Structures are given as C-alpha cells and as structure tokens.
Image (cartoon, rainbow, N blue to C red):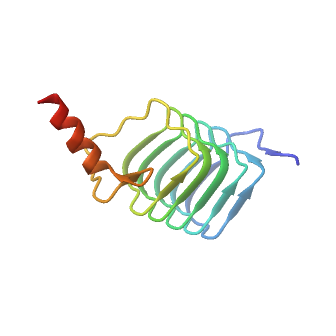
Amino acid sequence: MNLLNIRETLSVHDSDITESSFSNVKLVKASFDDIDLQSSAFVNANLSEATFVDVNLTNASIKDANLTRMKINNAKLVKVSFDDVDLQSSAFINANLSEATFVDVNLTNASIKDANLTGMKINGVLVSDLIRAFESRLK
C-alpha cells in the first residue's frame, strides 16, 4: 500500500468538498481554509502539522491517521469519529466537538480549558463526576 506523497504543500481554500475520501495520503503541512468537508473520510492519512481553519467536518471519519501538531481553529467537528489517531501536540481552538468519538487515540500531554464538558465521558465515566471527585479530595 503506497501513500500518495504530495511533494508541495497542499492548500485548499473556499471550497465545498463534502463526502471526499483521503486514503493512503501524505498531506504534511496541508492547509484547509473555509472548507466544507462534511461526511469526508481520512484513512491512513498523514496530516501532521496540517492546518484547518473555518472548516466543517461534521460526520467525518478519521481512522489510522497521524494528526500530530495539527491545528484546528473555528471548526465544526460534530459527530466526528477519531479511531486509531495520533493527536499528540495538536490544538483545537474554538472547535465544536459535540458528539465526537475518540477510540484508541493518543492524547499525550493533552490540555483542555474553557470547555463545555457536559455529558463528556472517559471510559464510560462522566468527566463532571471525575472533576467533582478530584475537587473533593483537594478540600
């Protein structure tokens, strides 16, 4: 299985490319700006250091992907599925991840702040319960 290797940095702007499929691709440092990628699939993709700004990835599927040092800003990622994805050192800024699922992901050194965590679970446990238990131990 060969990865498509884009030798120059891919830059996509102001486009509707819903239901696209990116399989076996190397898109290191790619730039997606003002793009509609609803219901798209990224499988076995290297998107390390990629930038997504003002994108709609609702219902997208991301599987077996390298997203290290990726930057996502002003994005809609509702119901996105992340499966076997490396998100190490990535940043989600002003991103809507409602109903997103993360399975077998690398979140090493992840930091979450100023986030609405209503209903969020980690391994089946509500995060609000975890935070409450942690805070009660500090008292």
| Nearer to us in this view, 53 or 115 | 115
Instruction: Say which residue appears at 73% left-offset and 49% top-offset.
Output: 44
| 96 in relation to 5, above or below | below
The quarter of the picture where the C terminus appears is top left
The percent position of residue 47, horizontal first and vertical second, equals 64, 43
The percent position of residue 43, horizontal first and vertical second, equals 70, 54
The percent position of residue 89, horizontal first and vertical second, equals 50, 32
Q: Residue 121 vs residue 33: left or right?
A: left
| 80 in relation to 68, above or below | below
Instruction: Say which residue appears at 29% left-offset and 53% top-offset.
Output: 117
Outermost residue to the right: 1
Q: How many marks?
A: 0
Q: Residue 85 vs residue 53: left or right?
A: right
| Nearer to us in this view, 121 or 16 | 121
Task: Specify the quadrant of the image occupied by residue 15.
Answer: bottom right
Task: Specify the quadrant of the image occupied by residue 97.
Answer: bottom left
Instruction: Say which residue appears at 56% left-offset and 44% top-offset.
Output: 105
| Nearer to us in this view, 103 or 52 | 103
| 118 in relation to 1, above or below | below
The percent position of residue 83, horizontal first and vertical second, equals 61, 53
Instruction: Say which residue appears at 26% left-offset and 49% top-offset.
Output: 129
